[in-house]
Every structure is written in structure tokens, then in C-alpha cells.
């Protein structure tokens, strides 16, 4: 099983980028993992929020195949504890075998078409985070999930 972290636009804050690279390296010890960045929509400032979501959505949909289980990081998604999230990852690996794609959209969320294509929505918290900060928080939680699955001492109950 492969895991892809699909992002709309690059991470431009150096302190976040450093953390993203740290967890990207750590995750490579547990799974076939990669980060893929969809380029920012050109002239996005002149677009309405809906038009921007539609254009970003078209770019996201091009990256998704039938063989993928697509999880959108979305404020209205299912919330898990870290242990529950590890259980989700473990069950998914054992049962479906489908490649996982976790998707972070732009600052205004996803288009209707992307929501229709998704298999699941995941919320990291009831709080709202910037779409760039979510990247680091999610990667840490994905790393934590693998250490829980393997019984490693990173997570403390």
C-alpha cells in the first residue's frame, strides 16, 4: 500500500517546511510515502472562492484514480483520537489494500466534485488551522499512528 499526501499549493513557511521534511523522512521508514504538490492556480486573487475551488478541484481530480481511497482533510470530517486513527490506518492496510491519498485543499476548501469523489472526510480538530499548518499537524499524527501500530514508545497513554 502506498500513501500520498496531496497538497494544493506549496508550503512557504520555512519553520513548517522543516517540520514537514522531518516527518516525511520518518514516515518513509514505515510505508511507501510521498508528498505531491498541486501548483497554485494562476491569478487566483482575481477569482471568486467558488471559482478557485472549482479550478483547484479539477487539478486534484486529475491525481485521483479508482484504485485510491481518498481522504479529505476537512473541518466537517470524522474526528479520531490518535489511537483510533492508528486503528483506521491498520484496518485499511489489512482489509482494503487500496492506496491511500490524503488531500489538503486550499484555504477555501474543496469543490463539490472533489467531495463527491472522496471516500472519507477527516477532521484533525474542531478548531480551525491554516491549510499550511494542517500539513505539519497531519504528518505528525500519521507518524504517530505508525508508531502506535508498531508498539513503539513515541506515543504515551
Image (cartoon, helix red, strand yellow):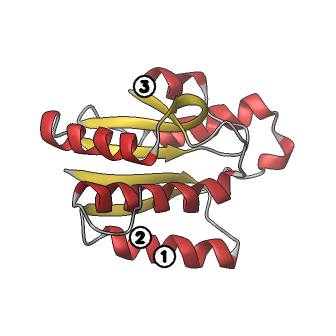
Of residues 7 and 40, which is closer to you in this image? 7
Q: Position of residue 10 (x, y in %)?
A: 61, 63
How many other residues sit within 10 Å of disc 2, few (<14), some (14-19) or many (≥20)? many
- The answer to whether residue 40 shows anywhere in this view is no
How many other residues sit within 10 Å of disc 1, few (<14), some (14-19) or many (≥20)? some
Q: Is residue 144 above or below residue 56?
A: below
Cβ–Cβ under 8 Å for marks 2 and 1? yes
Please tell me which residue is depicted at 63% across the width and 66% down the height of the picture. Answer: 11
Q: Position of residue 38 (x, y in %)?
A: 53, 54
Q: Is residue 19 above or below residue 129?
A: below
**Corner quadrant of residue 68:** top left
Nearest to viewer (mark 3 / mark 2)? 2
In the structure shown, which secondary structural element does the residue marked by tag 2 occupy? helix
Please tell me which residue is depicted at 49% across the width and 41% down the height of the picture. Answer: 60
**3D distance between C-alphas at marks 2 and 1:** 5 Å
Of residues 20 and 4, which is closer to you in this image? 20
Q: Is residue 139 above or below residue 16?
A: above
Q: Which mark is residue 24?
A: 2
Q: Is residue 92 left or right of residue 129?
A: left
Looking at marks 3 and 1 on the same chain, the residue that comes earlier in the sequence is marked by 1
Q: Position of residue 137 (x, y in %)?
A: 56, 58
Residue position marked by numbered label 3 in the rendering? 117
- The answer to whether residue 115 shows anywhere in this view is yes
Cβ–Cβ under 8 Å for marks 3 and 2? no
* Quadrant for the C terminus in the image: bottom left
Residue position marked by numbered label 1 in the rendering? 21
Q: Position of residue 149 (x, y in %)?
A: 25, 54
Amino acid at each position: 500500500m502506498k500513501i500520498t499526501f496531496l497538497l494544493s499549493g506549496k508550503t512557504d513557511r520555512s519553520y513548517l517546511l522543516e517540520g514537514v521534511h522531518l516527518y516525511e523522512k520518518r514516515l518513509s521508514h514505515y510505508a511507501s510515502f510521498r508528498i505531491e504538490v498541486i501548483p497554485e492556480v494562476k491569478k487566483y486573487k482575481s477569482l471568486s472562492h467558488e471559482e478557485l475551488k472549482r479550478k483547484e478541484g479539477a487539478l486534484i481530480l486529475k491525481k485521483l484514480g479508482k484504485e485510491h481511497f481518498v481522504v479529505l482533510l476537512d473541518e466537517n470530517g470524522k474526528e479520531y483520537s490518535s489511537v483510533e486513527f492508528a486503528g483506521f490506518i491498520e484496518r485499511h492496510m489489512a482489509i482494503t489494500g487500496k492506496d491511500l491519498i490524503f488531500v489538503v485543499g486550499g484555504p477555501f476548501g474543496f469543490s463539490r466534485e472533489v467531495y463527491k469523489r472522496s471516500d472519507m472526510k477527516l477532521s484533525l480538530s474542531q478548531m480551525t488551522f491554516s491549510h499550511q499548518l494542517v500539513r505539519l499537524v497531519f504528518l505528525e499524527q500519521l507518524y504517530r499512528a505508525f508508531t502506535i501500530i508498531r508498539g513503539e514508545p513515541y506515543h504515551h497513554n
